Amino acid sequence: MSTATPSETTVLGACPHDCPDTCSMLFKVREGRVVGVQGNAEHPFTQGRLCAKTNHYQERIYHPDRVLHPLRRVGPKGEGRFERISWDEALTLIGERWRSIIGQSGPTAILPYGYLGTQGLVNGLTVGDAFFNKLGATVSERTFCDSGASTAYVMTVGPTPGMDPESLEHSRFIVLWACNVLSTNAHLWPFIERARAKGAKLIVIDPARTQTATSADQHIRVRPGTDGALALAMIHVVIAEGLVDRDYVRQHTVGYDELAEHVARYTPEFAAAETGVDAGVIRQLARDYATTQPSAIRIGVAIERSAGGGQLVRALACLPALVGAWRRPGGGLLQLPLWAFPVKWDRLHRADLIPPGTRVLNQWRIGAALTGEIPLDPPIRSLFVYNSNPLVVAPDQLRLKRGLAREDLFTVVSEHFLTDTARYADLVLPATTQAEQHDLMFSWGHLYLTLNRPAITPLGEAVPNAELFRRLATTMGIEDPFFHRDDQQILRESVDWDHPSMQGITMEMLEAQGYARLSLPSADTFAPHAEGGFPTPSGKVELKASMAAGGNFVLPTFRQGSNEHQDGTPVPALPTYRPPRESRSASPELAARYPLAMMSPKSHSFLNSTYANHRRQLSREGEQKVFMHASDADRRGIASNDLVRVHNDRGSFVGVAKIGEETMPGVIIAPMGHWMASSRAEATPAAINPTAFADLGCAPSFSDNLVEVSRA
């Protein structure tokens, strides 16, 4: 619904970004122009607030550098020189090049690359999947975000939404593990504060002194990638000191006896040696967590980003069952509430259209794939990028840059701006912003569906992603009506409206109100597993995972079509500590050359690389920073505000040193998101991030990364 005054109209919208908060936005429109945005005060989770990234979203819509027409490259790749052409010319060129490539090399020579630059069901993650599957292109495997954590979570408790985030206000003991809520999940904070006002204690476990950590009752610093030892030591203490809820364990878990025997070796002293956390602190943490009920653990996306990240989540998913935290609202584990949304993902991505034997390429390996270090037959001859800026978010930046510079690689990018990636494109196509398109948003951080209505007519010749793929289907001669559905039809077909969680929710309700809570009990009463009922094969929490029973569950680290390459390591059925791959104990020779562990968390003012070209956010964020502990800086003769070079065998980048207590000795922090084009030495932390996968779900291992720092 829209409300109006003689001069201004308010249009209900929804934030499009890859963020757990999925805010309900109000677009203020005057004479066909968005003049402001604000959070919807009536939305129970948004509560009238937006974040530092989106508070001035109108500046993104009308940014002077925005791409508003199709562009064709006229200079060398990477220079960013383009000329305006028509949509007909652009589509004709795409059709000619793709038909030629398919005729010579087959459709797998085409690689799509899209992620969550836009999150909605109409224009988001899956918008191009059906088209490229129908085309027979290489399948682009996306495992950047929560793939490892989700694999571990489902192995243990199944695809359950778990806690209602709003129920945190009923918690008495809250652990935020690898989760900087105030920067990346800000709308959860009021519920935490309500709990604290009632006496709840807040613990933050993070190597960095984030904004959230400084606001906590206790900040426990752990060496990057060693959290698994801490979690297993907590289990050890809970069991050894008789703090187990034996009735809950007996009724609602499997594998307890095996787990109890297994964790006997994970003593607090063992964990202290691995993590740097005092054994006494570990014991007290476990005791408080077990005895202060209901207790809650909120895990962040970064939790999976080391060699043993999946096993860490396995351990954390066991803890609430061991202490009976699931019994009451405000107790349990909060991972991704998106499991509650009855989205018809199969109807969106249409995996049934993939021709048998089509190869799969993980996006994490795009640099090596484009340069030939990973031998592909046929090689990638065309790249189509949408909803992503891989030169900043993917690892192996220097190799990827060389791959994108190939003159024989036909690259098309759909974008708002000439990003680092778009500068290497042969064609750049103009995409709409959220104010110019229709969409329906699920959430991975709360339990509300949120509708986005277009507030204005698209600027220039920009088109929504869904329209882009309708045009591409026509260009490639695909006549199947499925590929020509309008936005409203896509929207209606993307959700199972007959699902119990959609009871009472209609499109008319969403049009009028802009959002609707799934048909679930209120946060005051929602305790989904008070009586068990976990969606696992056993119906219980699988402390010993049946998916991995007998050591037969082996996950791939890279796949190319039917020729799979696996690391051959069986996934253990019981949660097991796996130390960092790049560490003094695992690789002493590497650590001698590169003695510092580097983390590259999200920047406060950017969302991945989005907004890193905006004046307001850039002025707040400043240029690339490298946070160091004083002891590490002194040893290298580095003072605050010195330019420093961070490097390892994979590459290097330059940033400004910030010396203090933000990090712990032996660890540096370089927030990600800055663009190469505006960075010193035209490189960012992605230049030195590893390409190795974590233990589960082909998750990335950003935080398993040894480096050295010197004055630049």
Image (cartoon, rainbow, N blue to C red):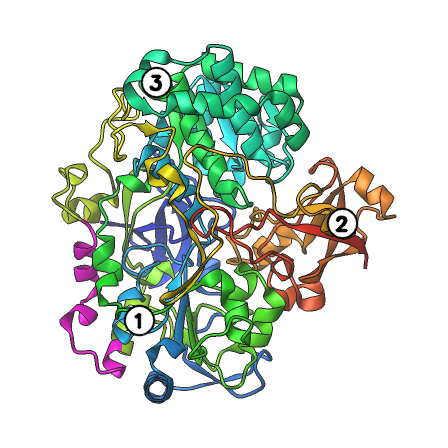
Mark yes or no: residue 146 visible.
no
**Amino acid at pointer 1:** Phe
Measured in 3D between alpha carbons, the distance from the residue under mark 3 to the one under mark 2, in whole angstroms, is: 49 Å
Mark 2, residues whose alpha carbon is within 10 Å: few (<14), some, or many (≥20)?
A: many
Q: Is residue 616 left or right of residue 470?
A: right
Relative image position of residue 664 (x, y in whole percent): 71, 36
**Discs 2, 1 touching: Cβ within 8 Å:** no
> Which stretch is magenta?
473-495
Q: Is residue 495 left or right of residue 368?
A: left
Residue 249 is tagged as 3
Relative image position of residue 63 (x, y in whole percent): 49, 65
Mark 3, residues whose alpha carbon is within 10 Å: few (<14), some, or many (≥20)?
A: many
Measured in 3D between alpha carbons, the distance from the residue under mark 2 to the one under mark 1, in whole angstroms, is: 44 Å
Tag 1's secondary structure? Answer: helix
Q: Which residue is mark 1?
A: 132
- Single out the mark in the foreground, 3 or 2: 3
Residue at the (34%, 50%) spot, across then down: 14
The answer to if 254 sits in the magenta stretch is no
- Single out the mark in the foreground, 3 or 1: 3
